[in-house]
Amino acid sequence: MPLVKSGRIVKDSFVRIADDAPVPDGVPAIVTGDRFIAEAAALTQRRAALGVVWPNNRPVAQLASYLDSIALIGLVFPLFRDGRAYSQARILRERYGFRGELRATGQVLRDQFLFMLRAGFDSFEVTKESDAAAFVESTKRFDVFYQPTGDGRTTVASRRLGRAVPARNISSRNC
Amino acid sequence: MYRYDELDQALVDQRVAEFRDQVRRRLVGELTEDEFKLLRLLNGVYLQLHAYMLRVAIPYGTLSSEQLRMLGHVARRYDRGYGHFTTRQNIQFNWIKLEEMPDTLADLAKVGLHGMQTSGNCVRNITTDQWAGVAADEIEDPRIWAEVLRQHCTLHPEFTFLPRKFKIAISAAAHDRAAVKVHDIGLRLIRNGAGDVGFEVLVGGGLGRTPFIGKTIKPFLAKRDFLSYIEAILRVYNQYGRRDNIYKARIKILVHELGAEKFADEVEKEWNEIREGDLRLDPAVVEEVSARFVYPAYENLGDNPPELARARKEDRSFAAWLDNSVANHKQPGYAIVTLSLKPTGGPPGDATAQQMDAIAELADRYSFGEIRVGHEQNLVLPHVAQRDLPQLWQRLEALELATPNVGLVSDIIACPGLDYCSLANARSIPVAQELTQRFRDHALARTIGRLHINISGCINACGHHHVGHIGILGVEKNGEEFYQITLGGRADENAELGTLLGPAVRYGEVADVIEDVVAAYVELRERPEELFIDTVKRLGVEPFKERVYAAR
Amino acid sequence: MTSPHEQKKRRINGTVVVTANRLGDGAVVYRTMDDDWTTDIASAAVVAAPAAAALLQRAEADGIRAVGPYIAPVELAHDQRVLPGNLRERIRVAGPTFVLPGTGQECARYAEATLALPGAA
């Protein structure tokens, strides 16, 4: 399953660790949400980067106080049409100011890339190779956006009123 | 009439290009049906019994004559020469090929029409009163707010994959002509004690398998909070609406299971996080949208001009149509004209390409180029000078668009039913046709008075049978079509669900039973002016049940 | 009338066909014995209900040509002609059961289909 970041297929620097396996030192590691909550004290002491995959039916508010210690949060689309992670992503970015890597996992398809970017995702475990290759092209489908999200894209309302781009751009990467 | 600017237009054009590519990928097998289905639904493309169906959005039921001509063109070029106007102010074409959908949508896009979000688990067409902007009793034009909200909800990255479809309606008058109480969110423009205009917000109304009347969770919402509060409702729903069972996934179930108060609290909590943020509505934004609504340059005319008075006296048919199909306009000297799409024996709500062209021409000539689509599946010319009414009527008569049955027993609302729809259990259109035959005598229909019959071919209730004065629901029993009949439903500010009359009735007997129900009403009413709905309210269904089932 | 969801749940006895809609244009099609699709119900593969599952499986694998296949009942007329076995399938053969607006004439296929059915309404 190719990983796309900044529009390119890249190698994943993180390793996913099963719940019953020890978390290795010195390696960027991703653990499940359950494990993170259970072992938060220890895990947040790690020097190497820490990632958490958070289920889509659990409030991200539970992560709020740990965000400074988390380098990556993976949110889940169990099916592409289960859109709960879009809300989770926006809350993490826009309410809690999460600045780390926000990764889309699960069934991640071409026709949702732009929605995901707008919601704050910046990396994608893409389900199909062909979709990963078409990433950049598919994000150029639209250049008109009605709603403000944390991505800093100018909205239609702003353009109409001739205002400058809103100062609030909390996306941490070029998308 | 809202004028698209180049930004609105660009979005529609980009959407056509995106869908063209999605169709291409489907046709060559790069997308499975499971991956493609929701994408096509998000452009209003259904697969029905015989063919694909395209549902074109008509935002808040307002069309320009240019747009109506394009709908006629689509009917002729890509379909079988006609279209069907729906209970949500949209139009459906029943026979378009998937291969031709991109071209169809490209043609529609030329006049700013599209099928965006007319299906799928997203916010659907926001509907309102078909007399918006011209009704004497409205506080202000609700369509401006419908447009502000339409833009906000179009391709909203967070709310395109909700648990289920989401329907919003807005009304602006004490008399609710938009059925806001049976929508997922109902909005009523109202004045508070201080004289400010704002919104009453209701949630959790809806029909279908588990009908509910909406609950007020915000008695008065200020205009500046319009978008942020609705965003909060959608976010709570997106996160907590059920995803495990499609029959329990609408917001009405969430509101019911949490209780309205708890639900309101959840919304309030979320809203407090965002109300002072980017979604706080700048009056300049509303002004800007509002400025692109063009209103007619009405002339200074008097009411009841001589041409009208004379024609009314001289022609009884014209007088009957005038009394039935023409309503008061807020501008003196003008009138609101309803074009009945319910001719005797015809499928309700359909118009041919020829009729569409002709109506467009009539709109140009008599209605400042504007047409409205009503949720009762009729059309409206909203700005007709009273002096033009006699001539207009002549033209409408010739087009079979002047049946004087608006709001009467033969003005039936029906879903497409088993003749078209893959969800249906029974047919609805032939039942409607038969009923229009039984009640084709307009003098009789007038004496019966206002009576709304709604027919649905299955429990999904697209015909809104729960809120019909007489509701008819098609079901299947052992391979045969049966119909459950309810009485006493209403969709207005006193919204209520109908009560079951008795055992279900077979297809061949429905029209007889309805005739008996109507006969019972005529017998039971206190006086001729007592409406059917009021007689049912006064007496309940028992006396009707006795009379109808006595002989059966 | 029985939607495909319900038809899947119900056990259908007797003779059946596998039917679907053609991908490109939505036309009603029927699976044939040689793994093809036809718009003519007379050319459909007619099997006894127990054999239908296998036929359906092969049809489902053919998602490039047809969408949403399901098992539908048919009846065999005394002269072995294949007839749709319920109202929904009759409508899929013959079209809506009324004159379409603007056509001014009875839908020809419907007229044929109703004549062919024993006990047609």
Image: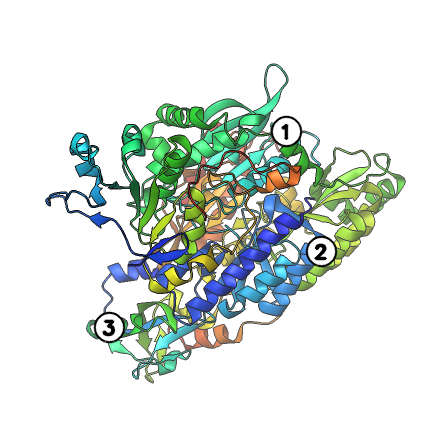
Count of picture labels = 3
Q: Which mark is residue C52?
A: 3
Report the residue marked by disc 1. Answer: B283
**Of residues B133 and B102, which is closer to you in this image?**
B102
- Chain on which label 1 sits: B
From the viewer's perspective, is B117 left or right of A54? right
Q: SS for tag 3?
A: helix
Q: CA distance from mark 2 to mark 1?
A: 31 Å
Instruction: Name which quarter of the figure residue B297 lies in.
Output: top right
Q: Residue at x 42, y 72 (%)?
A: B28
**Of residues B449 and B218, which is closer to you in this image?**
B218
From the viewer's perspective, is B283 left or right of B275? right
Residue type highlighted by circle 3: Ala
Q: Residue at x 39, y 57 (%)?
A: A8
Q: Colour scheme used in the picture?
A: rainbow
In this rendering, the answer to whether C17 lies above or below B454 is: below
From the viewer's perspective, is B492 left or right of B31? right
Q: Residue at x 74, y 36 (%)?
A: B329
Q: Which mark is residue B532?
A: none
Q: Which mark is residue B66?
A: 2
